[in-house]
Amino acid sequence: MYLRFLPKNEDEWQILKTDSNIVLYDFPLDYDIEVYGTYYHDPEISDSSITWQYTVIPIDYQIPNVEHEILYEVYIPPMDSISEESGLKSSKTSYYEDLMIESLKITGNYTEEESNLKSTNGLFKPKRWHPSGTIQVYDHIVNRNIPLQGAEVHARWSTHIETRITDADGKFRMGGFIYKVNYAIKWERGYYDIRNGGLLQAWYNRSGRHEGEWNLNIGTGGESIMYATIHRAAHKHFYGDNLGIWRPILMDGSKTKIIYKDGEGTGVFWGDWSSGGILPDIKIWGKNSSGNYKPTNQIFGTTAHELGHQAHSQYMGNIQFWQVSKIVYESWADAVEWALSNDEYHKLGNKYSVAAATNYFHPYNNHFDWPSVSDKAYSPIFIDLMDSWNQRNNIVDYRGITIHIGSSTYPNDRISGYILSYINFNILRNSYGLSSLRDEVKKHKITGVTDTDVDDLFALYW
């Protein structure tokens, strides 16, 4: 059945979004789109309301208890009944093709393309083909396009839909089609949903119908590279190598709502109190104070930071999380941002032999300058447990350039060797303020660290 839902609130939308058997579109599937963009909202629906959600489900599927309208029944034949090569038709193939053509005529979607593919003498059948391709996105640190892993790619001909997730090389390959398809990327996965501004699903739509590979390079400028980079950080947190820390999966089973704002700002974590909450879980702003789009490493880092908050809250529980002092929860999110960003770029640097990435040291909140910063709550206290730098000494980068002049006004960081996951599962849960954090570090000292080292490190953080 081809139908559409009209969720009246976020709760009902989450019912649909968390049903893995339903593939939602916020635009009609049986219309050709004249102008493609990154989102769509039905003009007859208020901008403050969720727009119609279109889908195709089996005839015997239990329809969720959300307001809906059945548009019409559709028939999608098994594509394995149609050969990979053109040739003589079997009676079964002819029957399937006739059914498809007749359904298009009934619904008013029979175009010149379908007419040309159906042979006049009835002896030859169309060739079955497989939509495939490679999705890449530009990154400013490595200064090149890189594979976009974990993206949900759609291929669609009318109500015949196939979806695939791109692999580590950004590649995908679909099931069979006999007609040209509409390609798209839906910026959504099982655990998170990237939205444009609030109630609008974010998409990358390829204009027109196509037969053949879709090899896409998402370049600089515009919202699409922002969506793709937010996706990179979210995929690392939820599905990829997150350095072994607690994943930010919402305990109530709903999807994390990541809102992209195409304006000036940084990021914010609201805290998920319910799937039906008015506020998004996370907001990410894409532009700097000059009105220009931020480089990809900043968008990646901000997303990693805000999801670090969410992982922290889900690990402790929302009630406990909001009892944690700001310097602890912001410093932990800074550490997550720093560690995941460094890991991401070091791997890319090694893969592409880019020294700037191999030696990348994520410049979160002027780490070396603390406490001479605008907000001391964003401190390097957790990073000081992991890195090998002591801010009281001069720091020289891989190019031999002095990037920090040490003095006694900075923390005395003689500690190194902790890893993010060890801190997460041994120190973080019972750390609500600096006193309890210091005590937890002392309880879980690693080899070579003394109580005096811990006391000296914390001395300037009070």
Image (tube, helix red, strand yellow):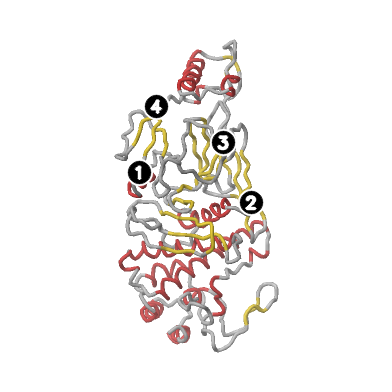
Local SS, label 3: loop
Q: Disc 3 and disc 1: Cα gap in Å? A: 26 Å
Q: Which is closer to the viewer, label 2 or label 3?
A: 3
Q: Give amino acid for label 3.
A: Glu
Residue 2: percent from left, percent from top: 40, 30
Q: Residue furthest top?
A: 121
Q: Which of marks 2 and 4 is nearer the N terminus?
A: 4
Q: Disc 2 and disc 4: Cα gap in Å? A: 39 Å
- For this rendering, which residue is in front, 261 or 134? 261
Local SS, label 1: loop
Q: Earlier in the sequence, mark 4 or mark 1?
A: 1
- Circle 2/circle 4 CB separation < 8 Å: no
Q: Give amino acid for label 1.
A: Pro
Q: Disc 4 and disc 1: Cα gap in Å? A: 20 Å
Q: Quadrant of the N terminus?
A: top left
Q: Quadrant of the C terminus?
A: bottom left
Q: Give amino acid for label 2.
A: Gly
- For this rendering, which residue is in front, 242 or 234? 234
Judge from the rendering whether residue 332 lies leftward or rightward of residue 323; answer left or right: right
Q: Which of marks 2 and 3 is nearer the N terminus?
A: 3
Residue 360: percent from left, percent from top: 61, 67
Q: Is residue 401 above or below residue 112?
A: below
Q: Give amino acid for label 4.
A: Tyr
- Circle 2/circle 3 CB separation < 8 Å: no
Q: Mark 2 points at which residue?
A: 219
Q: Which of marks 2 and 1 is nearer the N terminus?
A: 1
- Circle 4/circle 1 CB separation < 8 Å: no
Q: Mark 3 points at which residue?
A: 34
Residue 290: percent from left, percent from top: 61, 65
Q: Disc 3 and disc 4: Cα gap in Å? A: 23 Å
Q: Mark 4 points at which residue?
A: 72
Q: Visible in this render: residue 337?
A: yes
